[in-house]
């Protein structure tokens, strides 16, 4: 046996090892969310009465039905009573406002959400503003948005940005001075995400569908958080080596759930990355459950 024959297989193993070392560390939202739900279950059991969560659902949107199902399963795992208030697609703003007023005054409902999207005939702004700010577990009330901008710690933050912040903290990712690009400027994720990052002393750029050269911004970012729902929007050549990638997008392509990020390619140069599924989604649900428990504890049931 020649020396070359002896060295070659070891060299191949070395290259394979280097490949593994180069791949990004996974930000495992599913595992962290499970740990959070276990803690929340103990907090729920310590309450003198069962905490309650209600969800207002309009129409038969498949994505909404899936999200509501996830919330129901998480609530049951924690020990939260779950109630669904279903309405047809033809519902009026006044009908929803009446139900919201009832939920606002029910002592057994400690938090509730209005599942989005809502049909065009419904005044979404009026509906979200009608939710009691102390039961607004989705964090969409204008008052909660304002308190989050002011960095008031008792405010209920939108669940997805709150989950991302919890995940970054869990993995000890320091945000101070980091260049962060948030892709997407919705009221649900993009805007509150930017404010929460600014409050943690990050330098934040918000991009969106009208940004002329997205890659020019993302290439300089230490952290990229994408929340557009556009599959494969973030490609390998759009980020720098060692960047941290948080993928909020979730779309179905050929019966497979995918995010905004080309995961297989970007994983090879990022330092941390969230998978889809199993990244941000479970953290969103976990934060929602945490908000219900917080509201119940505040109400001193």
Image (cartoon, helix red, strand yellow):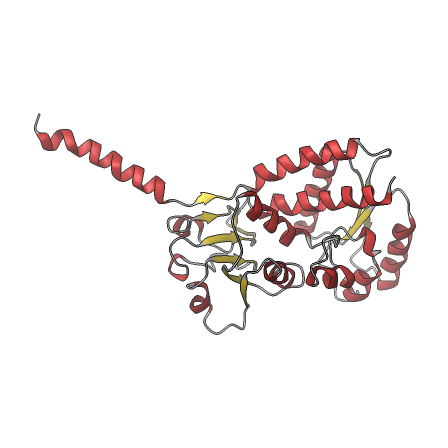
What is the total number of numbered labels drawn onto the structure image? 0
Who is closer to the viewer here, 119 or 189?
Answer: 189
x, y (%) of residue 237? 37, 60
Quadrant where the C terminus sits is: top right
Residue at the top extreme of this rendering: 1
Q: Quadrant of residue 66?
A: top right
Is 88 situated above or below 125? above
For the point 74% across and 53% down, the residue is 156
Q: Is residue 273 left or right of residue 166?
A: left
Question: In percent of the image, x 82 and y 65: which residue is there?
Answer: 126
Q: Quadrant location of the N terminus?
A: top left
Lateral position of residue 91 relative to residue 28, left or right: right
Percent across and percent down for residue 181 are 51, 62
Q: Position of residue 282 (x, y in %)?
A: 62, 43
- In the figure, residue 183 lies in which quadrant? bottom right
- Give the residue at x 55% y 48%: 168
- Please give the name of the residue rendered at 84% of the width and 35% of the height, measured from the top-left corner: 50
Would residue 192 be seen by someone viewing this image from the given angle?
yes
Rendering coords of residue 132 (x, y %): 84, 56
Residue nearest the observer in this picture, 219 or 101:
219
Can residue 56 be spotted in the picture? Answer: no
């Amino acid at each position: 046996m020649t020396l070359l024959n002896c060295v070659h297989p070891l060299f191949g193993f070395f290259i394979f090892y280097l490949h593994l070392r180069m791949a990004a560390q996974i930000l495992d939202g599913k595992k962290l969310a499970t740990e959070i739900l276990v803690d929340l279950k103990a907090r729920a059991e310590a309450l003198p009465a069962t905490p309650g969560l209600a969800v207002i659902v309009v129409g038969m949107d498949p994505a909404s039905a899936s999200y509501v199902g996830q919330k129901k399963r998480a609530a049951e795992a924690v020990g939260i009573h779950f109630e669904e208030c279903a309405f047809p697609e033809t519902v009026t703003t006044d009908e929803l406002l009446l139900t919201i007023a009832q939920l606002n005054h029910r002592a057994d409902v400690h938090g509730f959400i209005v599942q989005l999207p809502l049909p065009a005939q419904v005044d979404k702004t009026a509906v979200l503003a009608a939710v009691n700010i102390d039961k607004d577990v989705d964090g969409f009330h204008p008052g909660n948005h304002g308190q989050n901008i002011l960095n008031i710690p008792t405010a209920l933050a939108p669940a997805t940005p709150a989950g991302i912040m919890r995940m970054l903290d869990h993995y000890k990712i320091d945000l101070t001075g980091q260049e962060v690009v948030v892709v997407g400027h919705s009221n649900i994720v993009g805007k509150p995400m930017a404010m929460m990052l600014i409050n943690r002393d990050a330098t934040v750029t918000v991009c969106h569908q009208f940004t002329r050269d997205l890659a020019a911004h993302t290439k300089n970012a230490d952290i990229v958080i994408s929340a557009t729902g556009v599959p494969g929007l973030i490609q390998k050549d759009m980020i720098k080596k060692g960047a941290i990638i948080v993928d909020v997008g979730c779309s179905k392509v050929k019966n497979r759930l995918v995010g905004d990020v080309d995961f297989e390619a970007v994983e090879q140069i990022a330092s941390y990355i969230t998978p889809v599924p199993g990244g941000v989604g479970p953290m969103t649900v976990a934060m929602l459950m945490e908000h219900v428990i917080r509201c119940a504890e505040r109400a001193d049931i």
